[in-house]
Each structure stands twice: as C-alpha cells, then as structure tokens.
Image: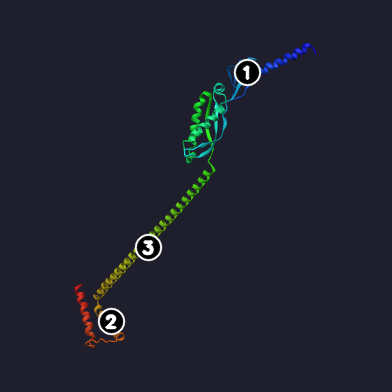
Amino acid sequence: MNPSLFAVIILAVLVVVVLLKTAVIVPQKYEYIVERLGKYSRTLGAGFHILIPFLDRVAYRFMLKEEVVNIPSQTCITKDNVTVDVDGLIYLQVQDSKLAAYGINDYKLAAAQLAQTTLRSAVGRIDLDKTFEERESINATVVQAIDEAAQSWGIKLLRYEVSDIIPPQSVKQAMEAQMTAERSKRAEIARSEGERQSTINRAEGERQDAILKSEGEKQRMINEAEGRAAQILAVAEATASGLRLIADQLRQDGGMEAANLRVAEQYVAEFGRIAKESTTLIVPNNTSDVAGMVAQAMATLSTVKQHR
C-alpha cells in the first residue's frame, strides 16, 4: 500500500474520531452536563455544540419533561392499628440540571423513598375509615414533604397521587357487612318514611273529603232554605196579589153579586163534600137559611171593603 494513502486513511479516521468526540447535538427538552478534566464546565441546552477533544466530556444527560415515577406498594398502619397496602405515583420535573447531577446521586430513587416514608407517616395519623376520604390531604402532605427536600436536588415535585388503598381481607369483609347493614337500615328508614307519608296522605285525603262533603251539605241546606224562602215569598206575593185583585173586582159594578154567587156555590159544595167524606154529618141550625149565610159572608166582605 502506498504510504501516502495509508497516511490519508489514518488522518481521516482521526478526524472522524475527533468529530465524534467534539460534536454534540442536544435534543429539545434535554440538558447535558459537560465536565472538563473531571470538573463541572457548563450545561448544554438544545442544539449543536463543539467540545474540546479529550478534555471535555458529557457526564450527565437530563430530560426536562415531566416524569412519572411509580411508588411500589407498601404496608402502612393506620391510627386505629389496621394495616393497609398503599401504592402511588409521583410526577416530577428537573428544574436545575447541575443540582440534579451533583446534589444527589439518584433523584428518582430519593423521591420515591421519601414519598414512601411520608406516606407511612400521613396514613398513621388517620383512621381507616378516613383513609379513603382523605386522599387529597395525603397527596398534599407527600408533595409538601418531597418538595421541601427536593429544592437542593434541582427537581420540582408537581403532584402525588395515591393509586390504591387495599385493606386486609378481614377488614374488607367487615366493611362489606357494615355497608350491607347500612343499606338495609336506609331501606328500612325509606320504607317507614314511605308508610308514614302514605298514612299522612290518606288522612289528609279523608279530611279534605269530609270538608268537601260538609261544605256540599251546607250549600245544599242553604240552597234548600233559600228555595223554601223564595217559595214562601212567592206564595205570599201571589196571595197578596190575588187578594188585591179580588178587592179591586169587588169595587167594580156587579162585583158584590158575583161574590154572593161564588160564596153560595162554595158553601154548598163544601157542605156536600163533608157529607160524602165524613161519617159524622154536620147540620146547620137552619138548613134553609143558605141565603143568610151568604149574606153574613158578604157583610164581612163589605166591612173589609169599607176599611180599604
């Protein structure tokens, strides 16, 4: 091989190695920590960068996106001495790459361990019945504890979520029995309330029915009384009108003679009716003196006419 060609090949290989060692491309939402001779030099942001060969090196690479770290299930003891298995998730983000590189060895492991410790402490301060209700409070307690410690790590804990709380099987059975009893109690209360309301409704209906009946009876009696009063008034007015008409006719020419004839006819007719219907016969002192009876009646009419 030509020595000149061999030298060119060796030179090309050296150039490629140098480029690989010096040229660094940092992706978006990432930061690289560069050390020079083992000492922190600078932080590289997204883009293309050139390093000094054999002196500079990329020591750490950090993603600036939000990261999710699973917290393994662990056993916690509640305030009322019941063991429960609790697991969760933490959401964190690197805020300062230099602190994340030199402030702690593994910030994810540290955050997970601190979350477990804080979680055991938070669960130990509440009763079992409230662990399911106090999830928001537990989450806030864990976030506050980790966030205070993580300031020197260059990370920010965004939130913590309790994934699941699993009590022992015996506690589950007791809780299910309690829930069944509570549902039965609510059903019994609802049934009794329904019966009570039904009784009230029936009593109210009967009361309204009695009131309506009494009002109807009252109105009926009022109507009947008004009808009888109207009837009596009508009869009285008709009688008064008839009497006025008779009196007016008596004052006319021939009125007295017509009245004599009418009285005589009625006298004879009534006397004959009594004779037919009654077993006892009433006989006047003077049966032939019909004219006298008529004259007496007409005298009474004349007296009435004079007083008018």
Left or right for 106, reference 178: right
Residue type (three-letter) at the residue carrying disc 2: Gln
The picture places residue 60, in percent across and down from the top left corner, at: 60, 22
Query: SS class of the residue under badge 2?
Result: helix
Q: CA distance from mark 3 to mark 1?
A: 105 Å
Q: Quadrant of residue 67?
A: top right
Q: Nearer the viewer, residue 300 or 207?
A: 207
Which tag, 3 or 1, sits closer to the chain's start? 1
Q: Is residue 246 above or below residue 132?
A: below
Residue identified by numbered label 2: 266
Residue type (three-letter) at the residue carrying disc 1: Arg
Whether residues under marks 3 and 1 lie with C-beta atoms below 8 angstroms apart, the answer is no
Q: Quadrant of residue 68?
A: top right
Discs 2/1, front: 1
Residue identified by numbered label 3: 213
The picture places residue 103, in percent across and down from the top left corner, at: 54, 22
Quadrant in which the C terminus is drawn: bottom left
Which tag, 2 or 1, sits closer to the chain's start? 1
Discs 2/3, front: 3
Residue positioned 28% across, 81% down in the render = 266
